[in-house]
Amino acid sequence: MIKRILVIFLIITGAYIAMNYLFDGNGVSLSKTEDSAKVSKDIENISIDISSVETTIVPEDRDDIRAELKGKGTVSVNKRGDDIEVSVKRKGFFWFNWFELDHTSLTIYIPENYDKNMEIKLGSGEVTFKGSSIQDRMELDKLSADIGSGSMVLKNLDVKAIEQHISSGDVEINSLTAETGTFEVSSGSVNVQNYTGKLDADVSSGELEIQMDELKDSISLNVSSGDIKLDLPDDAAFTLNGKTRSGDLSCDFPLENKQESDKRLNGKHGNGKHKIDADVSSGDIEIF
């Protein structure tokens, strides 16, 4: 019985390898590894839907979006109304890429002067998106990121709004300025350095660390079961309104009119200009 199962397994595996060779390997390739679309003035959004691919988004002097895939799979760049969609399809066997030893990578080139909206959906894999430098940042109206299980690196960006939904993944952000920033972390790790802007953070079960260069707007922190660490500049002026149920809330700043109990932590630092609301159900919030 065991031998019969082994023989069947080997036959199926051999058939898969043969088909992979004929249609997506070194034989007759039906894969599309490059595609592009011109970015006209009516384009309002760029949608990027990727999984199981190492992806780099590169802003440069150009008037189109061009995607180049190295490895196995098919890439497409489609214009649909005011939206340009970039997606990758990987061939698999029973929804898995068995014996997938190749390194597949995707490079997406976008116009550096594009300043509308961008959506990134990441099932698994890696995404890196960086502006040219701290002085020459990529500017966008809105950047939305939905991360299932993967990793993302963002750097040197200036956006009006950023929205991140992290189910289970790792995110690293550096040099980000936003009018509004929303971070929802279900189960993952988010580390933000050199951030400036309004902040709304909700952590169900995960970790969020944010270091702010300047406190210019209000902050809302909510933890159900996880950890938030907020690193503020020494001259930050804020009024803290903290509530706890079954968790910990701490603030290293000296507070005027301080009111502290098992369930509350209130007070003012500096002139108290900006409001910080912190609510802990079961977890930890540390402000320092």
Image (cartoon, rainbow, N blue to C red):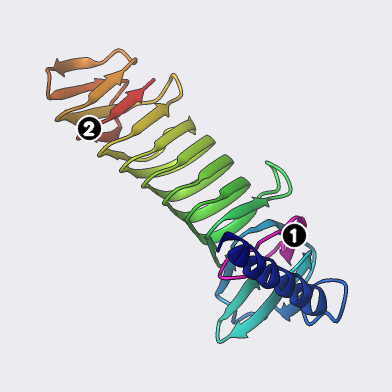
Give how far across and how far down residue 15 sits, in percent. 72, 75
Judge whether residue 257 is colored magenta: no
Circle 1 residues within 10 Å: few <14, some 14–19, many ≥20:
some
Kind of residue indicated by mark 2 = Ser
| 93 versus 137 height, above or below | below
Q: Where the N terminus falls, by quadrant?
A: bottom right
91 vs 214, nearest the viewer: 91
Q: Look at 48% across and 39% down and name the residue there.
A: 190
Q: Look at 44% across and 19% down and name the residue there.
A: 234
65 vs 24, nearest the viewer: 24
Give how far across and how far down residue 225 sits, in percent. 28, 36
Kind of residue indicated by mark 1 = Thr
Disc 2 on helix, strand or loop? loop
Q: Which range is magenta?
A: 91-116
Is 117 left, or right, of 197 in this rendering? right
Q: Which residue is mark 2?
A: 282
Judge whether residue 113 is colored magenta: yes
Of all residues, the one furthest to the top in this rendering is 254
| 126 versus 140 height, above or below | above
Q: Which residue is mark 1?
A: 104
Is 45 left, or right, of 218 in this rendering? right
Give how far across and how far down residue 19 sits, in percent. 75, 77
Q: Look at 53% across and 54% down and name the residue there.
A: 159
Disc 1 on helix, strand or loop? loop
- The residues bearing labels 1 and 2 have C-alpha atoms spaced at a distance of 41 Å
How would you classify the magenta stretch by its main secondary structure?
Answer: loop
